[in-house]
Amino acid sequence: MSFLLDTNICSAYLKRRTGLTHRFVQHSGHLYLPTIVLGELYTWAFRRAKPEELLAVLQHDLLADLTVIDFDRHCARQFGQLQSLMLTKGTVVNSVDLMIAAVAVVHDLTVVTHNTRHFEPVPGLRVVDWLQE
C-alpha cells in the first residue's frame, strides 16, 4: 500500500513525534507528498523568523525520502467531479483538503492525516491516522 501525506503528518514528523519515524522507514518508497501540502509546508517555513532552518530540514529530512506528486489536470478533473458530487449532496469539504483527496484518488493512494474527519465525507477515499494508531 502507498500513502499520500497530509500537512499535519509531515509537520508532526518534522517535530519528531514518536512513532512517525518508524512509519516513514517502514513505508519507505511508498510515501507521496502532493504539491498542495508542499505549498503549506513552505508557508509554515516562510512564516518563521528564520525560515532557512526549516527549509533545510524540509529539503534534507522530508523531501529526500518522499515522491512529490503534482496537482495536474487529471487531479483537477477529479477535484471537480468530487466537489460537484458532494455539493449536490449538500456536503462541503474544504477545497484544499478536497484537492489533496483528488490527488489520492487519481493515484490510488491512502491519505495519512490526523484530521480524518476532514476527509471522511469523500466517497471512495481511504484514510488513516498514524498519530492515533
Image (cartoon, rainbow, N blue to C red):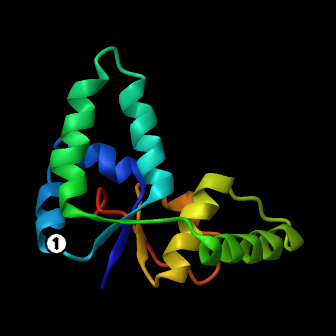
26 vs 116, nearest the viewer? 26
Residue 4, horizontal then vertical, whole percent: 39, 68
* 94 up-or-down from 48: above or below: below
Q: Quadrant of the N terminus?
A: bottom left
**Horizontally, is 85 left or right of 62 in the view?**
right
Q: Mark 1 = which residue? A: 28
Residue 31, horizontal then vertical, whole percent: 28, 70
* Residue found at x 29% / y 56%: 131
**Horizontally, is 119 left or right of 13 in the view?**
right
Examine the rendering and report whether any part of residue 15 can be seen.
no
Q: What is the quadrant of residue 118 in the picture?
A: bottom right
In the rendered structure, which amino acid carries the disc numbered 1?
Ser
Q: What is the quadrant of residue 75 in the picture?
A: bottom right
Examine the rendering and report whether any part of residue 83 can be seen.
yes
* Residue found at x 36% / y 20%: 48
Determine crowd level at label 1: few under 14, some 14-19, many 20+ residues with C-alpha closer than 10 A: few
* Residue found at x 42% / y 57%: 6
* 133 up-or-down from 1: above or below: above
Residue 25, horizontal then vertical, whole percent: 11, 67
Residue 94, horizontal then vertical, whole percent: 67, 53
